[in-house]
């Protein structure tokens, strides 16, 4: 018999009828990100998305799942929009406009379809929860900053991936890098957490939904420039961000975590190109 609910940890999201077979189309749709962003094979990626959506339709039609196609379609639409442009770091006027338009649409279109076509409020951006951060949350912010300060210089410089970002030596390019890093980090939480993760949690336990969203998250970060052994860092980061959102239900908090981490990323890239600021203990 199909289960009416996934588990107790989905109480804060709409409960839908689901079945273990739903993992197959979800893996196809989320796994397509590896082809689209990791290997830059759009035709193969689109084909994988299409197969995943067809299988989701069959699951819904059989009665084993409910609205699986509708939710996976939103994730697929976002991925297709992102895939229409190169996500390689580009600080030119054209590049920054391209990023703003494409990434903005990848969040906006699924949100509008969910809100005004599906008539649902699944995709939300809960900036404030009305609760103060506790001591553990504040300590975690310190931990994230220190971990980034210790690990990121070694990763970026020894792997050479800092060269995936444009050379930044002048004040205007450094300012553009700062804006770009902050903007993309903000978008990460709006799309991967508040859209992909939340939609998947309607059908799967949080741990499964988190693993699925991390596939898309890490694949995008690979194209953006976090290559070499970067997934050893980005996979845990994506999983922890999803888990943190599940615990706090606060976009504001996961955004703060991401911004602190990205502040270190920004400083490391600038340091790798200019030798400033010389604040990193383990920099090669």
Image: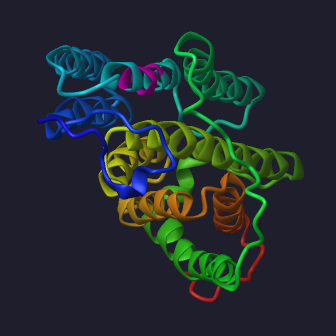
Q: Is residue 116 visible?
A: yes
For this orientation, the residue located farthest to the right is 171
Quarter of the figure with the C terminus: bottom right
Q: In the rendered view, does 80 fall on the left or right side of 132?
A: left
The picture places residue 216, in percent across and down from the top left corner, at: 39, 41
Residue 71 position in % (x across, y down)? 40, 25
Q: Camera-side residue: 242 or 268?
A: 242
Q: Residue furthest left?
A: 1
Relative vertical location of residue 284 with respect to residue 184 in this rendering, above or below: below
Can residue 228 be seen here? The reply is no
Residue 201 versus residue 76: which sits nearer the camera?
Answer: 201
Residue 93 image position (x, y, % from top left): 78, 27
* Secondary structure character of the magenta stretch overall: helix
Residue 11, horizontal then vertical, whole percent: 46, 51
**Who's the residue at 33% across and 45% down the image?**
212
**Residue at 55% across, 72% down:** 152
- Asked if residue 121 lies left or right of residue 12, the reply is right
Quarter of the image holding residue 236? bottom left
- What range of the chain is rendered magenta? 72-77
Q: Is residue 74 magenta?
A: yes
Q: Quadrant of the N terminus?
A: top left
- Is 154 above or below relative to 129? below
User: Going by the picture, which residue comes out furthest to the top?
Assistant: 117
Residue at 45% of width from left, 22% of height from top?
Answer: 74
Q: Is residue 201 left or right of residue 175?
A: left
């Amino acid at each position: 018999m199909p289960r009416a609910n996934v588990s107790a940890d989905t109480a804060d999201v709409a409960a839908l009828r689901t079945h273990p077979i739903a993992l197959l189309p979800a893996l196809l749709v989320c796994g397509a990100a590896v082809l689209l962003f990791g290997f830059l094979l759009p035709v193969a990626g689109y084909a994988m998305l299409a197969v995943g959506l067809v299988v989701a339709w069959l699951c819904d039609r059989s009665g084993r799942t409910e609205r699986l196609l509708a939710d996976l379609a939103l994730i697929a639409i976002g991925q297709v929009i992102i895939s229409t442009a190169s996500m390689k770091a580009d600080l030119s006027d054209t590049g920054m406009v391209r990023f703003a338009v494409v990434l903005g649409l990848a969040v906006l279109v699924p949100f509008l379809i969910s809100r005004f076509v599906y008539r649902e409020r699944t995709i939300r951006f809960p900036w404030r929860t009305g609760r103060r951060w506790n001591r553990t949350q504040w300590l975690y912010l310190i931990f994230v900053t220190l971990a980034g300060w210790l690990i990121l210089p070694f990763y970026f410089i020894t792997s050479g991936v800092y060269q995936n970002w444009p050379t930044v030596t002048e004040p205007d390019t450094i300012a553009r890098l700062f804006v770009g890093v902050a903007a993309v980090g903000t978008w990460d939480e709006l799309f991967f957490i508040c859209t992909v993760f939340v939609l998947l949690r309607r059908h799967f336990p949080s741990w499964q939904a988190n693993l699925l969203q991390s596939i898309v998250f890490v694949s995008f970060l690979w194209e953006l420039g976090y290559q070499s052994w970067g997934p050893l860092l980005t996979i845990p980061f994506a999983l922890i961000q999803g888990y943190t959102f599940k615990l706090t239900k606060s976009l504001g908090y996961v955004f703060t975590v991401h911004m602190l981490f990205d502040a270190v990323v920004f400083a490391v890239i600038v340091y790798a190109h200019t030798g400033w600021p010389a604040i990193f203990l383990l920099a090669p």
